[in-house]
Amino acid sequence: MSEENPQISLSGSEAVDRAAAQWKDAAHRNIPGLGDLPIPDDTANLREGPNLHDGLLALLPLVGVWRGTGQAIDAEGNHYNFGQQIIFAHDGENYLSYESKTWKLNAEGAVAGIDQRESGFWRISLTDEMEAVITHSSGAVEILYGQPMNERAWELESASTMVTATGPAHLGPGKRLYGLMPNNNLGWVDERLVDGELRPRMSAELSRVVG
């Protein structure tokens, strides 16, 4: 996980210099693959593997591996910090694969245990209608729809949520916003409907480590 503090406000030149240093290392890394399937391995690095499908150009900036820290509120209303890794990858087909892993952090920033995981797929139509299917390790599946807000930001709203018998009892419909920040980190926030209004549930700022 990146050791830099994502809350530090950077000047324009500092942000560019830091991004250039990060990308210098990230450009030569990729997610591991066994390499022995008769089809292409997934790639999170646009310089390697199959070409990105033309239909995904509006999502191109997301492709990569991102790591950082964030804040969350649990079902009991307790606030806690977490670390996170998000992977957006592709195999040349017209979708992105998505994977998120989070881990709880204590007050000193040390790992305090495994938290939530998500996996799924993102698509976007020729008219920029986005759709995402996301499966939660807690026992929920969501279908979300949305649109790019611009070339650096994407907003999705949950249209359907199914929860297993042992899944979260109070996971209401929600909204997610992902965007590249001025320092080129990936910021995101998840809001959920509680008592008739959207309230923040999770948010994070992540640095690119692959891609």
Image (cartoon, rainbow, N blue to C red):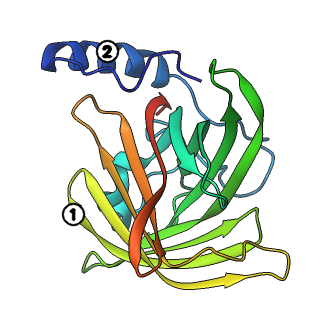
Is residue 9 rendered to the left or right of residue 40?
left
Above or below, 92 against 68 in this view is: below
Specify the amino acid type for callout 1.
Met
Report how far apart the C-alphas of labels 1 and 2 lie in the structure.
26 Å
Q: Which residue is mark 2?
A: 18
Instruction: Kindly indicate the quadrant of the structure image that contains residue 131.
Output: bottom left
Above or below, 207 against 96 in this view is: above
**Which residue is rendered at x = 63% and y = 53% of the image?**
99
Specify the amino acid type for callout 2.
Arg
- Residue 14 is situated, as x and y percent measured from the top left of the image, at 21, 13
- Residue 152 is situated, as x and y percent measured from the top left of the image, at 24, 50
Counting residues from the start of the chain, the first of labels 1 and 2 encountered is 2
Q: Is residue 132 visible?
A: yes
Above or below, 193 against 16 in this view is: below
**Which residue is rendered at x = 69% and y = 65% of the image?**
136
**Quadrant occupied by the N terminus:** top right
Q: Residues within 10 Å of mark 2 (few under 14, many from 20)?
A: some
- Residue 175 is situated, as x and y percent measured from the top left of the image, at 41, 69
**Which residue is rendered at x = 64% and y = 17% of the image?**
108
Q: Which mark is residue 149?
A: 1
